[in-house]
Amino acid sequence: MRRRLLALSLLAALAGCSSHGKGEAASSTAPAPAPAAIVPPPSTDADQAAQRMASYAPVKLTADLSAFDDRQKRMIALLVQAADVTNDLYWQQSWGDKAALMARIPDEVTRRYAEINYGPWDRLDNDQPFVAGVGPRPPGAQFYPADMSKAEFEQADLKDKAGLYTLLRRDAQGKLATVPYHEAYKADLDRAAGLLRQAAALSADRDFAGYLKKRADALLSDDYRPSDFAWMSMKDNPVDIVIGPIETYEDQLFGYKASYESYVLVKDQAWSARLARFARYLPELQRELPVEEKYKAEKPGSDADLNAYFAVYYAGGANVGAKTIAINLPNDEEVQLKKGTRRLQLENVMRAKFDAIMLPIAKALVADDQQSHLTFDAFFENTMFHEVAHGLGIKQTLTGKGLVRTALKDQASSFEEGKADILGLYMVAKLAEKGELDKAKLMDNYVTFLAGILRSVRFGASDAHAKANMVRFNFFQRQGAFTRDAATGRYRVDFDRMTAAMNALSAKLLTIQGDGDYAAAKRLTDSMGNVSPTLAGDLKRLDQASIPVDVTFEQGLDVLGLARP
């Protein structure tokens, strides 16, 4: 009953959230295939949806905008509107016709839960359907025809079939054909590009205005590299927007297709200044990776930077399931090698997750005498260096199999997240050795890292971060990096063994990536990516204690106190 009351209170709190527009359907040249599900009777399980809502803690996304004049505030409002378009785009990619799904759900609670999940599958519960009659979530989402097999895809002679920005559809003869995103979603992309150009006209920062115009062009051409380079060149802009088809998590068939998402951000100038010094260590840390020389021969770009932001709007793929607390972009390997990446720490969301989720988890599952080592500073550092670590390692395989993300297919996302997590902790240890971080507090990072694993594995097996965390949890446990007290059900970190396990797993992941060894990647995930009965019982205790799994946002122009332009 407590969980249901919490969920109903959450629903009431969410009633003031900005609603997503109805959007426009995909172009008639490339209709999205219907989801692979039978036509069901309407759902009536509002009680179940209300219980599921208790998995999310509500968080208001806002920031102090008093330093911005009216012109800048109008610009921010336009950026929020442009970001909102990616909600419509992501619905089309993840499910299809949002209005049709909502029409078959008779109760408001389940409709709201479907909005949170961008479809009828619970992203925090292994994609279990929560609308009556809906079948399993198609692994290829709406990127591929529902009746397409992997073998048919592999045999198709289409040069851009594995492209990030193409859909697979059937032509009039029933054969596979590719359709570029900018054609398939033209109406929505025209709308988003127009809003970005309006915002550019209001920007007082010339570089930011140039980036917005280039990004608008990219939405209409699917050529994102020029705008990525422009984004990397910006240093002083107080407002930022990340918008476009970016991550490939939604494509669980091959991991090839990118989903639309957006963030609107306001820079924390003081925290950003504190972080700036760490970026210069990236080339040195690459050289010191605990792996054979050939797996670290690539030189990361030296134009990378670290900054802290207040997130004021999430949309599309960024807003589904477990919410991102830090960003490392761009994903384009050529841009990374030439310019590096930008790491954006979303400190308000990070703080909300630490307070509402991490601390209660530690209280329930970490040994009493190690709980003092769980700190926000350690959480911030672990998260920050996770993002920095995306720039380490290797992007091109050493075995002639092309890019790592292409060679590892559906395993690529979870392996990249796993690499970033483990190398992030490795970087913390190395920087402590160099005197850049407090070596006496390194145990804080280790204990907080363990609590972070326990937090992330609750996201469900469909989430790339959760899969990566589960592999790491099992690997570390087998190496004795931490132990579990059978009497109390609490976990304790062994400092020396955790250091050794960190180095061993780093070498294993980097080698598999460098070799482009899909079979080895799949074996590791299959053997170590599962939740044991013991851990499942421990996680159940967190549910029974009503500890949220993640957050959901109250956000939009009203929350920010901004007028609609």
Image: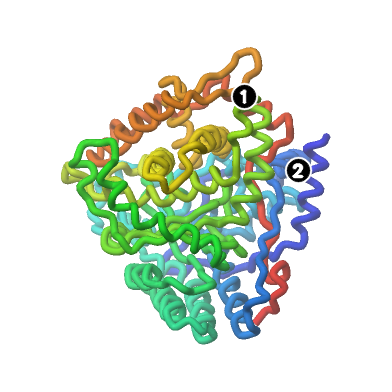
- Can you see residue 253? no
**Residue at which label 1 appears:** 367
Q: Determine the residue located farthest toward the top in the rendered image.
A: 487
Picture residue at 64% right of the left edge, 83% below the top: 69
Question: Considering depth in this image, is 33 or 504 the residue closer to the camera?
Answer: 504
Crowd around label 2: few <14 · some 14–19 · many ≥20 (10 Å)? many
Say what amino acid the circle numbered 1 marks.
Ala
- Can you see residue 551? yes
Badge 2 element: helix
**Residue at which label 2 appears:** 50
Relative to 519, residue 114 above or below:
below
In which quadrant will I find the C terminus?
A: bottom right
Relative to 80, residue 389 above or below:
above
x, y percent for residue 461: 51, 35
Picture residue at 54% right of the left edge, 53% below the top: 95
Badge 2 vs badge 1, beta-carbon distance below 8 Å = no
Say what amino acid the circle numbered 2 marks.
Ala
Q: From mark 2 to mark 1, how far is it between C-alphas?
A: 33 Å
Question: Considering depth in this image, is 413 or 91 the residue closer to the camera?
Answer: 413
Choose top left, top right, bottom left or bottom right for residue 174: bottom left
